[in-house]
Amino acid sequence: MLEKHARLMHFLNSCEEVVGRKRLQKMIFIMKKCGVPFEEKYEFHFYGPYSEELTLRIEEMCNLGFISEAMEEKRNYYQYRYNLTDSGHDFLEHADIERPELGGYISAMNEKSSRFLELVSTMLFFEHLPKEEIEEKVYTVKSRQNYKQEELEEAWAFIRELRPVS
Amino acid sequence: MAYRDEKLDEEKVFKDPVHRYVHVRDRVIWDLIGTREFQRLRRVKQLGTTYLTFHGAEHSRFSHSLGVYEIVRRILENFRDHKDWNEDERLLSLCAALLHDLGHGPFSHSFEKAFRLDHEDYTQSILLGDTEVNRVLSGVEEGFPKKVADVINKTYTDKLVVSLISSQIDADRMDYLQRDAYFTGVSYGHFDMERILRVMRPLEDQVAIKESGMHAVEDYIMSRYQMYWQIYFHPVTRSAEVILSKILKRAKELYKNGYEFELKPVHFFSFFEEAPSLEEYLDLDENVVMYYFQMWIREKDPILSDLCERFVNRKLFKYIEFNPNLQMNAWRELYDLFEEAGVDPRFYLEVDSSSDLPYDFYRPGEEGERLPIHLLQPDGGLKELSRLSEIVESISGKKRTDHKLYFPADTIEQISDEKTKQRIKGILYGREEQ
């Protein structure tokens, strides 16, 4: 029952807390691209890969009481903070799912900004293209973010570092 | 005259129950409609299993695709000569509108989940591969198929073109809401599209709505909300969807275990291996799938046979409302009781959640991820819809979610061990018969 939800709970349990919906979206996408068996379907929305399924699944888990969502008011926007609840821990304990080790991915991503994760996830979204075309795509679809060449280089290095992690 | 500018000697019209007429004048559009990949969409239903709940819902992705094309054509009539609209993008927009669903397979959603496929990947493959569609598009100019693919993939440079078929108020949604309402026979999918088209304005990289059109947009948003809960997520349709998924899961499991099918599912082999080629993918339409389901009723495997019988002859699973948190123990006990009774719970017990069919209800921006609907103010400024509309504001923040437990009530009645049967019924219905 609810295996897809349980996989997300396993992720939340592994990182204890996630701050920001965009950050959560990008982290799951990046891990999925690294072969972690998340099943949420992503599409390219205006500003990057986005999963409606993930958004809805998180809402379901909040409504069920498996995770808690705290809203914090920032200057121009609201920020959301997610934690696994006691019920969530209980559910996860009995869930019949694989539990891959996610610590390596999480600590690597936690050191990076949301802006950087956004860049990495966009590059991974276009990974079927040649490197030059990927960079061209980033400059096109992310023109408002004004990514610099150094950031792209850092993102390439990050992807290389992340992929062997298991 | 260049192929891209060629017009038909006489305008072709398709009679359409939603838009009255679909008008085609461009040679390229006419040629695309005639390709085998586009014609295949006649054999893929727009609403999958919904016809088992609403018998009128037999319409195809073919008619929806023509409808989206027609809406974009009408929008662009209004955009012509507008300073923010580049008329050179007209043919590209029309092609993308017509072809946006080209990669949909049979019962798309269940197939994608069961075999880990993505129809969008196949749309790209059809556009860019060795296909009739690709040959027509390549005739326009070198690189044109790639441009169409980029628009459909939402990664094209000109976001305004992308917005026409993929945004919170786009031609895709405007067609399917009206078409699905028409064919299911319900009254709540209607809104004043003509009014919306009249108040749409191209604005740099998005389509904005004149503030005076706000009430028409409110109707459209309400229509999305109601159609989801009344049609798309109808519990009986979900029951059919659960059975369909179980059939695919069982057939794949049997294949992997070396089971000898009476009718070898040759069209499914590459799907079971999760790697169908483009040709194999295009060969499997809903007519072919239904043929196999009909034939599998006679298979020796009792589970496959029973599930196919249920799907083909509409003997669906029953359901109850279910809270996976509060009823966690009930689930575990039911699972064990089903096993004890010889009813395989992997195929006959399922919790279905609203996230299994993502709901694209209106959200006023997801930390910048999704562009909201903007209303164009008389002074030229933009305001997000829910800030001006109380109706939209009242539903855009709601997080209604839903979980149901599906099970075969008739099979439970046939369980021979009376004690087990009564306990199962006690959990499901809250009462045990004496």
Image (cartoon, coloured by chain):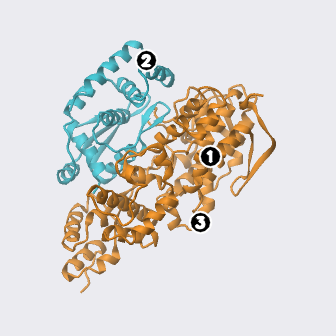
Residue A128 coordinates in the image, percent (x, y): 41, 29
Q: CA distance from mark 2 to mark 1?
A: 36 Å
Report helix, strand or loop for mark 3: loop
As displayed, is residue B345 above or below residue A54?
Answer: below
Q: Residues within 10 Å of mark 3 (few under 14, many from 20)?
A: some
| Nearer to the camera, B89 or A79 | B89
Figure chain in orange: B
Disc 3: which residue:
B56
Q: Answer with the quarter of the image where residue A99 lies.
A: top left
Residue ID at (56%, 39%): B131
- What amino acid type is highlighted by mark number 1? Val
Report helix, strand or loop for mark 1: helix
Figure chain in cyan: A
Describe residue B106's horizontal placement relative to residue B199 as left or right: left
Residue B305 coordinates in the image, percent (x, y): 36, 70
Discs 2 and 1 lie in a common subunit: no
| Nearer to the camera, A89 or B337 | B337
- Chain for disc number 3: B
Disc 2: which residue:
A147
